[in-house]
Amino acid sequence: SRLHEDSNALLEHVSKRHIAMISRDLRNNLNDVFDDDLLFRMACVKMEKSEPVYAQKILQLVRKEADAMRKKGRYPLKKCKQLRLIPDHTQLLEEGEAFIAVGYARGNVNTIKDIEKSDCALAMRSPAYFGGDLVKLKLVSRKTIRLRAASLTKTKETIPAASTCSIYDGPGDDPSTFFEDLNTGLVISSKGERSAADMMSGGDFDGDEAWICWDKHLCQLVKDYPAQDTTTPEFIVQKSQQEKALACRVSLKQRAEFALHYRYHQTQLGKLSTTLDSAMDRFGVDSPESIIIATQAFLQVDHPYKLCEIKQDHDHDLVEVYHESPHWLGKRINRGSYISEKALGVLYDYVQSKIDAVVTVCDDKDKTATRLNTHIMSIINAATQKSLHDSVMRRQLSELQNKMRLAIADFYSEHKKFKEAITDDGEDAVNMTMEWMKCQYRYWRKNLVDCEDGEDAKNLASAILYEETWRKSVESSFQGEHKMFAWHVARDRLLRIIGDAVQKSTGIGVAPTLLREHEKILYHRRGGYIS
């Protein structure tokens, strides 16, 4: 909703998207590139949100961002971070305890205060398969660490030899210096029969990261659950000869076979993960059905050469999972999907209600009636006033209007024929369509705008094209396609008209309608074409 209501928030957001856009390969994302670039430029010139295309682009952005956030329950939460797992070599932490380092050395005061107020935290690696993969840890504060280190010094207990193995260890015998100087990470106790890292779906300390949350309310809702025992016979799989072979000793053919097999392995893992999502939602995280699927998914990760499949003995128990999935996975209801009342289903519906609220505000004609941009229309109005006393201007306006109407009709007639001629919906067809569109826009730019003499004449032609495009979109059932024609052909002219008018009204001068360093990159990547 902030993207729709707050112009500054919208500009900040689209600026980040624009910078990311120009830094990636644009050849396979031409639709997204144009939409992002146009929205960025519209926001830069402070266009009125009532402008039809601008309102449409904002609405599309809101939907896209909300859908991306909502996909498979990836919801942003406060008081959470993704941190690297670090073992406690100082032995100051007891079994089940942890220490969160999030900027102590840098003085990140607000985050430090939040963590110091929390008694426990939740930790989980991704992917997680079993209920016990979500670990509840007791947090230890810096004050407690210091007291334990001081007590250790007073009793003159010897510090283990391994305690000086970190670059964060101090020059003396005070083990608390490690915790004070550590910038970021989740320090986990190394005491006990099994490390908390291993409890989190078989993690270790070779660079693994975990999601950590210290929100009190969320921690209170989570109960301790025993970690899955992965030492039982069903979890023991003998490695194949291919897995044991060193990469330097295999042939090029064997490497190619491994690469192909890896793709198949990833596909199988994806199927198991999706099935596991449905089983957990329908039967519960700790249900026998979910554990059966989770076991195979867990093994498939560590054993790429072994095809981990669910035994046919369990097919009867999982028939509902195979045929139906919860609606929060994104499938349509009545098409192999059911409405889930579990946590992710409730969250999915909550976010959907927020999206619908924003869409309603954007689409509500009583509250946000769209109208053509006043700065662009002022050029036409000035020419119309002049035509009342100038027959040459009157004839020129009439000719331009007729010319634009015929061009719009001709373009979409050819566009319709081209689409009917292409029967394939694959990537090649999309690229072919985009190339055809680019050639068409170059042609119409040359024949509708660039052919006019002088800047004023070109601006007038662009303004009339803008008005006639909108008129055609209102009359036609293909509103989305017709609405964009003027922006594809004369985008830079229209934005310059708006930007200059806005800046002149504030007395600042000419508007920064284009970021020149970005424009240069885009120009070369599009093969010398700027719409």
Image (cartoon, helix red, strand yellow):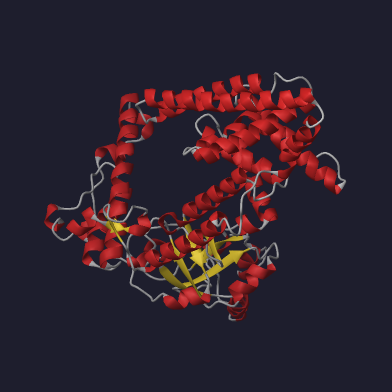
Position of 209 with respect to 297 (left or right) is right
Quarter containing the N terminus: bottom right
Of 3 and 21, nearer the camera is 3
Of 107 and 373, nearer the camera is 373
Q: Position of residue 268 (x, y in %)?
A: 28, 45
Position of 25 with respect to 134 (left or right) is right
| 438 relative to 375, above or below | above
Q: Is residue 231 at all visible to an observer of this figure?
A: no
Tell me which residue sits at (43%, 72%) in the image.
136
Tell me which residue sits at (22%, 63%) in the image.
289
Q: Position of residue 526 (x, y in %)?
A: 60, 26
Position of 52 with respect to 450 (left or right) is left
Quarter containing the C terminus: top right
Of 382 and 364, nearer the camera is 382
Of 51 and 381, nearer the camera is 381
Tell me which residue sits at (17%, 57%) in the image.
319
Q: Position of residue 149 (x, y in %)?
A: 60, 75
Which residue appears farthest toward the right when viewing the image?
A: 507
Tell me which residue sits at (65%, 28%) in the image.
401
How many numbered marks does the figure carry?
0
| 299 relative to 223, above or below | above
Residue 429 location, quadrant: top left
Q: Position of residue 283 (x, y in %)?
A: 25, 66
Q: Is residue 50 at all visible to an observer of this figure?
A: yes
| 180 relative to 478, above or below | below
